[in-house]
Image: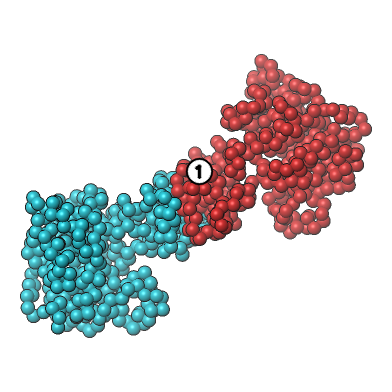
Chain colours: A cyan, B red
């Protein structure tokens, strides 16, 4: 066993509290022009519930952590908006990054700060811009993941694939861990990048693969130990920042150290190498999940419109559709949007930019964003 | 021969001057939301030439009439806009109707007013919202029509049909009139309403049918004589208004008499019954003509865009199309319009209303207008 392999027998504090870390970043390029660099998708109510994706994420986690148990890590550019959307969080619950350094630095910073504040805790990392149904499945998966984390594992949650999607990575499940209180938790054989359709279908045929939703549950100290072993310079930088965070030198240390931190995703930094050494577990999640990667994914999350017409994100009375089946309309400019005879249409109407496409082209919206940039309209991105 | 039949031998004033009458009305419903009741299509530059349809119509006619030879008849609601667009016309050249009374009242009023001002003249009536190419064909057709009018006929211009359109009425051509200076002019056997596709194709197969573009050229006195015989009450009302028009009682007489005038199209009032009596002639026109009835008709009139992408009415830099073949985009709200993967798309972006459809549905835009009205958004119509 390598140094990263958990030692379930030793150091098993069953009472370690659970804390949630919410990395709030990502531009949501394929949701342009609704999602912008200055107003990314986690700041929007994309499902018409009256709560933004960030707010819904925190709403989902607070009952699992208890009051004060959620920390949000976001870019400095979005700090004010995040605080405004989450007045229930304390001042110290929003960690603002001076610049993007990818998910390992974001989650590692939160782990180090929380460990300094509270001693060892179990942390769970959940992106701010995913949608999860309101049933009991999510809480049960987190509970099981916390059990695995207390046993020393890096636990992830595997989503039951509803189709051989090429938009997600997959997690390959192995044998059960044998946890008495969470028998469903299994070893992770490995992770895969987004596959092609044929490979994805082959994965699903085995029954051993699930979507990787990028959720990780792990003891803060275990995470930091893995980081220390695998990326010691990044570990030391984060610890230096965390040690100063709540003191008078916090801002100065952050400014000095942060820019030099390595940019790397937690998947590559920790999950993949630790899985190879047997230290990652997967909880088969029994809930609906979506990362709303594009407007096609958004549509089924919205309430059905009249008849079989397009669904509306916004005020239904701002949309008039004639002879249209399916699709989604976002009337976000306060104007009347009318559509005639275009099935599965996607219309996103904002005050300074309009997108017209169809659900079948939703994944290619990035090419529009590229064209917008190439035309010199960076201000619209 | 009935009383309406012309008497070519008698009363043939070869020197009668030519005057143009431009009825400027019609909402252009199928061009919504670009064309509105408050800003109908004749007030718009729909072809990207820098001149509105009304201005282009007058530009085309003034060289044929000479200075001061064009009269515009429009609704009171549009009088100010018409005068602003046509500063080259004198104050008396814009006749404002208190309310819409259809084309017979509009053209009859102009004929009566011109006859009072100038004595008998040949008048030609040309809608303000049609598009005609800039070649010599139109002027030649008008010249021949004036010859026929001087010979006592109601002359119309028949457009060579490029397809068996169901959007236009047709004129059925008979034998040549035998005019020495305009040998191409023929008798009209009759007019038809908009036919179905099969009937239209059968018409064209005979070689004897042309599109009826609603252009009429006739001596003012001949027109008024026909009107006197066919609709004497309407005739007398128009004459009463015309007699007072340029005097101090003009406005009062107009207010008193106009509301009671019969609403009827000149086609039904004059052209059809006079044609049945042998008094209508047709000049086969050798020019391209379009009434821009919908956005599909608009497209070929615009300059081609890059590659085979959509054509743009407005600033080309306000439109970004990716993977789009054909179609038309009208960026009239000053925003960036992006389209992805919708061939033959029609996007009309105005400050308070947006339309998204395809060229194939262009004729059904009226159903959107109906839905807008039914939804209580009359202010957008």
Q: Nearer the viewer, residue B199 or B180?
A: B180
Can see residue B250?
A: yes
The picture quadrant where one finds residue B70 is top right
Q: Is B336 above or below relative to A214?
A: above
Residue occupying image coordinates x 56% and y 37%? B39
Residue occupying image coordinates x 78% and y 45%? B285
The x, y position of residue A209, in whole percent, is: 31, 78
The x, y position of residue A165, in whole percent, is: 38, 72
State how many labels appear.
1
Q: Is residue B246 left or right of residue B231?
A: left
Q: What residue is disc 1 on?
A: B332
Can see residue B46?
A: no
Instruction: Return the chain for callout 1.
Output: B
Q: Nearer the viewer, residue A28 or A233?
A: A233
Callout 1: helix, strand or loop? loop
Residue ranking furthest to the top: B248
Residue occupying image coordinates x 15% and y 66%? A233
């Amino acid at each position: 066993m390598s140094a990263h392999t958990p030692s379930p027998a030793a150091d098993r504090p069953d009472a370690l509290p659970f804390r949630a870390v919410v990395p709030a970043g990502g531009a949501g390029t394929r949701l342009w022009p609704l999602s912008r660099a200055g107003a990314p998708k986690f700041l929007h109510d994309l499902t018409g519930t009256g709560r933004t994706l960030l707010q819904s994420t925190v709403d989902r986690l607070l009952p699992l952590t208890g009051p004060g148990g959620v920390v949000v890590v976001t870019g400095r550019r979005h700090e004010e908006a995040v605080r405004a959307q989450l007045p229930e969080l304390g001042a110290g619950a929003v960690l603002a990054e001076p610049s993007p350094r990818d998910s390992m630095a974001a989650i590692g910073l939160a782990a180090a700060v929380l460990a300094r504040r509270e001693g060892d805790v179990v942390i769970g990392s959940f992106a701010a811009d995913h949608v999860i149904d309101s049933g009991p499945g999510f809480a049960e998966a987190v509970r099981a993941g916390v059990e695995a984390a207390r046993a020393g594992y890096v636990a992830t949650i595997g989503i039951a694939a509803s189709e051989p999607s090429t938009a997600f990575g997959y997690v390959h499940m192995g044998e059960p861990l044998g946890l008495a209180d969470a028998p469903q938790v299994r070893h992770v054989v490995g992770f895969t990048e987004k596959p092609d359709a044929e490979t994805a279908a082959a994965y699903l045929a085995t029954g051993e693969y699930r979507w990787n939703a990028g959720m990780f549950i792990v003891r803060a100290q275990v995470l930091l130990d893995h980081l220390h072993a695998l990326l010691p310079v990044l570990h030391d930088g984060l610890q230096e920042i965390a040690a100063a965070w709540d003191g008078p030198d916090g801002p100065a240390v952050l400014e000095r150290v942060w820019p030099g931190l390595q940019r790397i995703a937690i998947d590559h930094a920790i999950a993949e190498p630790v899985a190879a050494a047997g230290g990652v577990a997967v909880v088969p999640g029994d809930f609906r999940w979506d990362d709303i990667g594009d407007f096609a994914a958004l549509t089924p999350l919205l309430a059905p419109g009249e008849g079989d017409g397009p669904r509306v994100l916004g005020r239904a009375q701002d949309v008039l559709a004639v002879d249209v089946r399916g699709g989604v309309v976002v009337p976000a400019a306060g104007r009347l949007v009318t559509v005639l005879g275009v099935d599965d249409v996607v219309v996103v109407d904002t005050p300074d930019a309009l997108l017209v496409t169809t659900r079948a082209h939703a994944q290619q919206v990035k090419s529009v964003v590229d064209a917008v940039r190439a035309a010199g309209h960076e201000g619209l991105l």
